[in-house]
Amino acid sequence: MSEVQRGEVLFEMKNIEKIFSHVHALDHVNFDVRKGEVHALLGENGAGKSTLIKILTGVYPKDGGQIFMEGKEVEINDRDDALALGIAVIFQELSLIPSLTVYQNIMLGKEEGKFGFVNARKEKKDIQDLIDRYGFPVTADATVETLSVAQKQMVEILKALSTNARIMIMDEPTASLSQRESEILYKIINQLRDQGVSIIYISHRLEEVFNLSDRITVLRDGKNAGEVEKEDIVPSEIVKMMIGKELSESTASRSLHESDTEVELEVKNLSRLGYYEDVSFKVHKGEVLVLTGLVGAGRTEVLRSIYGADPYDSGEIIFEGKVIKPRISDAVAKGFGLIPEDRRTQGFSPLLTVTRNVATTNYDKLAHGGFVNKKDEDELGKKAVEIVDLRPANPNVVVGNLSGGNQQKAVLGKWLTRDLKVILIDEPTVGIDIGAKDEIYEFVEDLAKQGVAVILVSSDIAEVLRVAHRIIVMREGKIIKEFKDGVATQEDILLASSGFTGDEKEVAHE
Amino acid sequence: MSENKKSFDIKKLFGNTRIIVLLVMMAFFTIMRPRFFTYGNFVNIMYAVTLIAIMICGAMFAVLLGGIDRTVSGNAALSGAIMCVLISQKFNYSNGGAIIAILIALGGGLLSGLFHGLIMSRFKIPAFLLTLSTNEVLYGIVQIITGNQLINNLNCELTNYIGSTRWLGIPVPVYVLLLCFIIGYIILNHTVYGRQIYSVGGNREASELSGIPTRRVIIIAYMMSGLMGALSGIMLSCQNQQASASQAKNYENNVLAAIVVGGVSSKGGSGTLQGAMLGALLIGVMENGLRLMGIPSIYHDLAKGIIIIFVLALDMMAIARRSGLARGIFSGRKKEKKEAVASE
């Protein structure tokens, strides 16, 4: 077998096709990996990145095309095939067993020994040697649960190295890392590349992609949208490739203006150590203010602090001209509402009926000396079903049995049955089908028309542009840009979210 | 429409596997031992079930919250001991003294409940572990209070009356149970607090974000549990005219078994008090029947365990039938059809 030299193509996927019930998830996609390169795979949600990776690791079978390793055609039917070819996925820390040590985790499933006994001392030494070779800041006999997220990731990488992986796939590896931990990971990635390991890198953080990658492949709508070598990377060009130019103006941009109605809620220099810092903004009556940015930018945490669900360290929250110290029950009484990020764990009680769920926010109206008036309660349930147009239109259905979109409508019903002044909405349409999405946007618009101040957190740019009157972009706990007058485009927001604000748009990385 | 609803309810009643199991069991025992189906024997069963059932009226709240309260037995032992020690050593067997002693004993239960509620509402401790250990602590306190001696010959008019009188042929503690059940039922079904219990038990975080004072809900639940445990202990001491350091020991197992057999989810958030009562009755009838049939007591636990597993297995099968693919493809569609028919 002729050794592939550094910089030569090691692995190649040609004309890959994948069809999910008549939808072309991948349409003749080409993708190759050279030995010892960091190759980033970019694209918006649904562009086909994960489908491609799943074909590459044997999770999905391909419907067409060919895969070559070192020039020879191969079939990858399952994870073992992928591993045998030296392709490893670096999972988030999830695949480690916390109570075991580093070396035990790495050796898991490939323990060597005689008669069922393992030679722990030899295993430990071998793994320590491997660690020393790369100089990772972990020890072989540390217990995994004592490690930081970044260290756990190193254990994942070591696990891959111990199987002689030649291609490592890293999917959003920095999503749960701090800035400093990310820097360490970047160093490790560079080191792996220098040792001849190829890395397929997927991340929404464009800045790090531009800094790390030797090459970028952009996918859009299941097709190749472009391939760029390191020397030719221009951030705004790549964002254009990701978004595509066919989009009509109406969905790709939105004209914004700050409302001139009364200010309902103001946040001044709000800070919470480790979550967000010096956040200030105002929301007017009848205005939809959108907080956008990447996951982990601190947006949800700001919302929760305003609602009283989480504390804050300093700063002020001013409601109708008065400084308030929010507690959830007070906030609800004042006319605040929260549609939380994860409706399953935070939005509703799955075993209870729609009526009972809607009632949880309405006991101030339903109670008479501690007793619930069942008639009022049933009326309320009916009213909620009517307001949110629930399907099935039955207030006695257990919420856990509804579809995702209708569950979210039930959560909406908890608040739309109240007289709201401020509503805080966190990623309202995740996992919801398009029809229900539109309905939810209409509710948001209606609320604003009724004079409710809306703060909406969203990572979905199409959604941001659909509902926003004003847009604030957060990054790493800080507000980095506000779009309030004029036109905001998808491109502007994507660039700002990734840390390219305004003027430096055309400036490439260092 | 209302007629429709009623017929559905009856169907549900007879669809309840527990009632069927209970009826089958009663028929079986009656055929085997006609003495089973006599008034005298039913009173026996009532005596046996009452204490457990009073405890359930409180422990139910903790279970609905997805917790568990194993201290019902410790609280019962403590309150019995407090009452007997006070009556015999401080109040000289007077009736007025007995009332004060009973109130103090109930206060002990409330205090114990408050303690557990405060801890359960603040910290993420498994309720099982907490109450397993604090139950030992409670029995330890009982041993200290009683000096590890049996306090008997409780020659007090009031406690005697509670323990041995029958009104209309029914023992007084059964009336106490009836009162507890009615109060518990009303709380769970008609008060804001009852609604909040189900909500917090079903999803604590969602409840908190809806503005429900979840901590208060949890504290009150454990206080209810402590209070009912204490009340049950008082009844026990009145019946036996004594308090011992091991009084009511292991009752919690029957209490929790009855609650779970009664169809209350051990994860919290669903189940009814009447269901739990039925569970208690099921266990009581079974123990009584086995005894009547002359089966040696060494086999009772074995039989009890098997019946509990049997009822739970029926449940699991019903849940499995309702969930997963079956729910989406079969029963869901069926239900829709039924609704469509009903609306026509």
Image (cartoon, coloured by chain):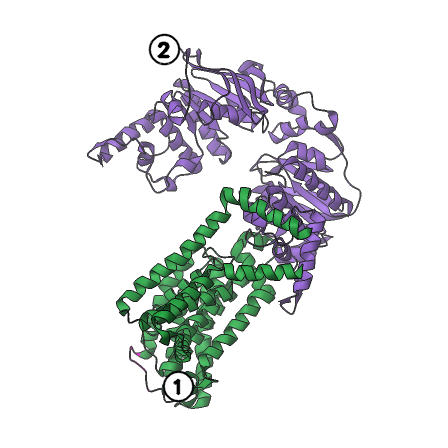
* Residue under label 2: A3
| Distance between the alpha carbons at the discs numbered 1 and 2 | 94 Å
Q: Quadrant of residue A190?
A: top left
Nearer the observer, A483 or A116:
A116
Q: What is chain B's hue in the picture?
A: green
- The magenta stretch spans residue A291: no
Callout 2: chain: A
Q: Quadrant of residue B196?
A: bottom right
**Which residue is painted at 22% across and 34% down in the image?**
A119
Q: What is chain A's hue in the picture?
A: purple
C-beta proximity under 8 Å, tags 1 and 2: no
Residue B277 pos. (x, y %): 47, 68
A30, above or below B96, in the image:
above
| Magenta stretch, residue numbers | B147-153
Is residue B243 at all visible to an observer of this figure?
Answer: yes
B198 left or right of B4 in image: left
Q: Where, quadrant-wise, is the N terminus of chain A in this rendering?
A: top left
Is residue A327 at all visible to an observer of this figure?
Answer: no
Residue A74 pos. (x, y %): 41, 16
Residue B87 pos. (x, y %): 39, 86
Nearer the observer, B330 or A328:
B330
Q: Which amino acid type corresponds to the residue marked 2 in the rendered image?
A: Glu
Q: Residue furthest front?
A: B31
A198, above or below B171, in the image:
above
Q: Which mark is residue B87?
A: 1
Nearer the observer, A381 or B157:
A381
Q: Quadrant of residue A166?
A: top left
